[in-house]
Amino acid sequence: MTVNNWPIGVFDSGVGGLTVLKALRRRLPKEDFVYLGDTARLPYGTKSPQTVNRYALQASSKLVEQKIKALVVACNTASSFALDILAKAYDSIPVYGVVEPGADAACRIADETGILILATESTVLGGAYQKSILGKIPELPVYARACPLWVTLAEQGLYDENLASLLIEHYFEGFGGDGPKTVLLGCTHFPILLPLIDKVMAGRFAVVDSAKTTAESVANQLEAEDLLNIEGGHVSFMATDGIERFGRIGKRFLGEEVGNVLKVDL
């Protein structure tokens, strides 16, 4: 088996990263993937940077054991804090995060009204998206709002209910009129809410889905490095706890049955 036939490793603290996996599979249908959800220790967002770095190294090490050709960090918190450490630890394979692709895409379409980042509290406070955007366009207005209840909506499958509509309106409150016209979804849970966001906000915003932008970036870079597979399409799943719940909730994020989930220790 050549390196091109090796799988791509993807990890997150839980099920949110499955939106990234879904986008990757659509963009790269002939690639094999190994997904790891560190469900025993979620959420990473409440942990210190030192703890996140340790967890990320342990999770990625389990994937590297599977002989992967690339590593995708499908977690905003780990992408914010641990990406450089992972790249140094595994310098023989490319390591991709979700922050830079999302920030790049938002900057490409933003106008002078700026960008609104919607994310979890830890991602907003960490400032990785803000730093990346302002590094590209220093004069651009950048706003950020934590939307913690959106994670609950996504995981509980409440995104077709009136409650979800009210909470979407709530987190957009104050950003109408002359406010930012570009929205960056800075949490891997949020793409599952995108159809409802579009409906509730009536197309008033150009929304950037960081899962799709990450998939596009990974595909382009693998092609540039001549690492694409020409046959495959298999996916395997691992989780560190609650494999039944992972499979049940994961179906909402992946858009199909998750299948067998292997319980692993890190």
Image (tube, rainbow, N blue to C red):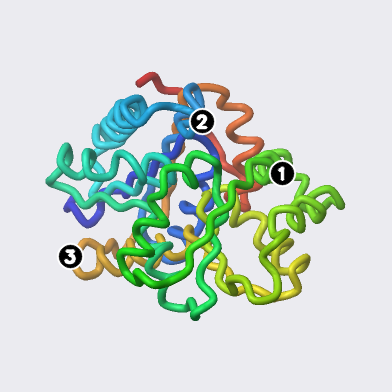
Q: Position of residue 250 (x, y in %)?
A: 60, 41
Q: Which residue is mark 2?
A: 43
Residue 28 in view: no
Q: Earlier in the sequence, mark 2 or mark 3?
A: 2
Where residue 168 sits, quadrant-wise, is bottom right
Q: Position of residue 186 (x, y in %)?
A: 50, 54
Which marked residue is nearer to the observer: mark 2 or mark 3? 2
Residue at 59% of width from left, 47% of height from top?
146
Mark 1 burial class by Cα count in 10 Å: few <14, some 14-19, many 20+? many
Mark drawn on residue 130: none
Amino acid under disc 1: Leu
Mark drawn on residue 153: 1
Q: Which residue is mark 3?
A: 225
- Element under disc 1: helix
Amino acid under disc 3: Glu
Between the residue at mark 2 and the residue at mark 3, the CA separation in whole angstroms equals 33 Å
Which marked residue is nearer to the observer: mark 1 or mark 3? 1
Residue at 22% of width from left, 57% of height from top?
4
Looking at the image, residue 44 sits to the left or right of residue 257; the answer is left
Residue 74 in view: yes
Mark 3 burial class by Cα count in 10 Å: few <14, some 14-19, many 20+? few
Residue at 47% of width from left, 23% of height from top?
41
Q: Position of residue 227 (x, y in %)?
A: 21, 61
Amino acid under disc 2: Pro
Q: Position of residue 141 (x, y in %)?
A: 48, 68
Where residue 175 sits, quadrant-wise, is bottom right
